[in-house]
Amino acid sequence: QVQLVESGGGLVQPGGSLRLSCAASGSIVSIYTMGWYRQAPGKQRELVATIARGDSTNYTDAVKGRFTISRDNAFAKNTVYLQMDSLKPDDTAVYYCNARILSVVSGRYGTSDYWGQGTQVTVSS
């Protein structure tokens, strides 16, 4: 069993900052790419940012220069962060953590994509 647990969402004024965290736990052997997605009301879920095991990153154009993704794999912390600065009302959405994880269950190895439960980010004055 693998779980992703997110934290850090909330209400912030335009121009403000938030930091999201997502911790992976369970029968984890290795974590490959980790990322953040978001879904605004009435819209499809979209990619925000990803970070590979080697720490190479990818951002959607709308957040480049404002958001920073990072990860901490030290001592099995298995956590990915999203630092969000200069927030805009258009950033309002539910943010979901995603990770591609190699796990072992009952001696069997398998790779799957896992999702967190989502955390609400609201940017409003």
Image (tube, helix red, strand yellow):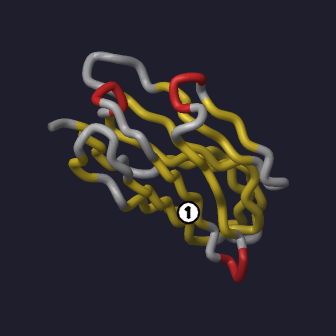
Hey, which residue is sitting farthest bottom in the picture?
A: 75
Is 68 on the left-hand or right-hand side of 22? Answer: right
Is 53 on the left-hand or right-hand side of 6? Answer: right
Residue matched to label 1: 2
Residue positioned 23% across, 43% down in the render: 13
Q: Position of residue 25 (x, y in %)?
A: 56, 70
Which quadrant, please, contains the N terminus? bottom right
Q: How many marks?
A: 1
Q: Position of residue 60 (x, y in %)?
A: 59, 27
Is 66 on the left-hand or right-hand side of 41? Answer: right
Asked if residue 1 shows in the view, the reply is no
Residue positioned 27% across, 38% down in the render: 14
Q: Residue 24's quadrant in the figure?
A: bottom right
Hey, which residue is sitting farthest right in the picture?
A: 54
Q: Residue 59's quadrant in the figure?
A: top right
- Depth check: give the residue in front, 118 or 16: 16
Give amino acid for label 1: Val
Residue positioned 49% across, 60% down in the render: 22
Which quadrant, please, contains the C terminus? top left
83 vs 13: above or below: below
Q: Position of residue 79 (x, y in %)?
A: 59, 65
Q: Position of residue 93 (x, y in %)?
A: 32, 34
Residue positioned 24% across, 47% down in the render: 12
Is 90 on the left-hand or right-hand side of 23? Answer: left
> Dot 1, crowdedness within 10 Å: few (<14), some or many (≥20)?
some
Hey, which residue is sitting farthest left in the picture?
A: 125
Q: Secondary structure at mark 1?
A: strand
Asked if residue 9 shows in the view, the reply is yes
- Depth check: give the residue in front, 112 or 106: 112
